[in-house]
Image (tube, rainbow, N blue to C red):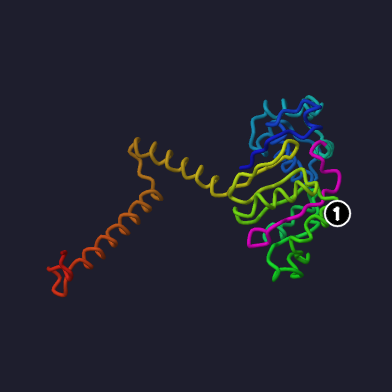
């Protein structure tokens, strides 16, 4: 769902591929769930299934971390949680600012997973003066005029942009100028940033369009095999009904009071 431009410097020096870095949070999520159930060890096959990857890829990924597990025993869950957390930089506190406190920004502010994963929402920022001082998730919203000061005072290096598309680039430039070097962009636009600044983009509409493509392809394959897909058939019937209703309304609009002569004749 998200794509990045550059590697973190520490990751480059350790030679960990970007694809492996992208899978580390999946492993960490699965391992955390095992840890919460007090599971001491896990096999590569079990962990790979929980993370949604194949076991050979998992073992290759873990080899970059210097973790190979124990034959017949598997991987130590707690050690892997620590090892991956350290590699991802989650063993320290990361202050984050969220810019744009509309519906999406407010939802992000209320997300409880930030704190448990090493991220602290240091400030909520919005351009609307009417929002200033209003608490969201227990944090008072501050005006964008305070952006640079907040970044400096809080030592922020990660910014989240949840503004409308038209404002995102300007906000991005202010964040970068103030010292932010990593940006999570929820705005439906592509940001231009200088070298050394990492951007991850989250676009829900693109993800839905990709899912729609796969749904259409699966329906086509089933239709070619002579199989009727109930959900697809229902959508087609609904679309046909809408077209029929629209056609009927147009026909009625073209008819006069007696239903057979146009009410307004063309000149």
Quadrant in which the N terminus is drawn? top right
Query: Residue 48, image x and y in percent?
Result: 68, 34
Question: Label 1's element?
Answer: helix
Q: Residue at x 41, y 50 (%)?
A: 231
In this orientation, which residue lies closer to the viewer: 11 or 64? 11
Q: Is residue 182 left or right of residue 237?
A: right
Residue 97 forms part of the magenta stretch: yes
Quadrant in which the C terminus is drawn? bottom left
In this orientation, which residue lies closer to the viewer: 213 or 225? 213
Q: Residue furthest front?
A: 267
Q: Is residue 181 left or right of residue 210?
A: right
Q: Which residue is tagged 1?
A: 154
Q: Is residue 256 above or below residue 152?
A: below
Dot 1, how many residues are within 10 Å of its Cα: few (below 14), some (14-19), or many (20+)? some
Q: Residue at x 71, y 48 (%)?
A: 173
In this orientation, which residue lies closer to the viewer: 221 or 188? 188
Query: Residue 196, image x and y in percent?
Result: 75, 36
Residue 99 forms part of the magenta stretch: yes
Residue 59 found in image quarter: top right
In this orientation, which residue lies closer to the viewer: 167 or 247? 167
Query: Residue 182, image x and y in percent?
Result: 75, 43
Query: Residue 240, image x and y in percent?
Result: 30, 55
Q: Residue at x 76, y 64 (%)?
A: 142
Residue bounds of the magenta highlight: 87-105
How many marks can you see? 1
Q: Is residue 129 above or below residue 88?
A: below
């Amino acid at each position: 769902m998200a794509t990045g431009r550059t590697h973190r410097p520490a990751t480059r020096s350790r030679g960990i591929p970007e694809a492996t870095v992208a899978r580390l949070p999946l492993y960490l999520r699965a391992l955390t769930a095992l840890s919460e159930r007090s599971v001491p060890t896990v096999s590569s096959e079990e962990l790979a299934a929980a993370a949604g990857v194949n076991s050979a890829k998992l073992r290759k990924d873990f080899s970059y971390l210097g973790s190979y597990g124990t034959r017949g025993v598997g991987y130590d869950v707690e050690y892997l949680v620590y090892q991956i957390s350290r590699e991802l930089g989650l063993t320290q506190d990361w202050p984050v600012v969220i810019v744009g406190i509309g519906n999406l920004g407010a939802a992000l502010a209320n997300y409880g997973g930030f704190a448990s994963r090493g991220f602290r929402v240091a400030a909520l920022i919005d351009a609307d003066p009417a929002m200033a001082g209003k608490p969201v998730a227990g944090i008072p919203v501050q005006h964008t005029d305070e952006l640079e000061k907040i970044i400096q005072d809080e030592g922020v290096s990660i910014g989240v942009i949840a503004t409308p598309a038209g404002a995102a680039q300007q906000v991005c430039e202010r964040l970068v100028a103030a010292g932010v070097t990593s940006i999570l962009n929820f705005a439906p636009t592509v940001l231009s940033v200088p070298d050394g600044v990492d951007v991850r983009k989250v676009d829900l509409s693109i993800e839905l369009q990709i899912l729609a493509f796969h749904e259409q392809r699966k329906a086509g394959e089933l239709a070619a095999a002579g199989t009727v897909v109930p959900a697809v058939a229902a959508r087609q019937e609904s679309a046909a009904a809408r077209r029929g209703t629209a056609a009927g309304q147009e026909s009625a609009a073209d008819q006069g009071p007696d239903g057979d002569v146009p009410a307004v004749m063309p000149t």
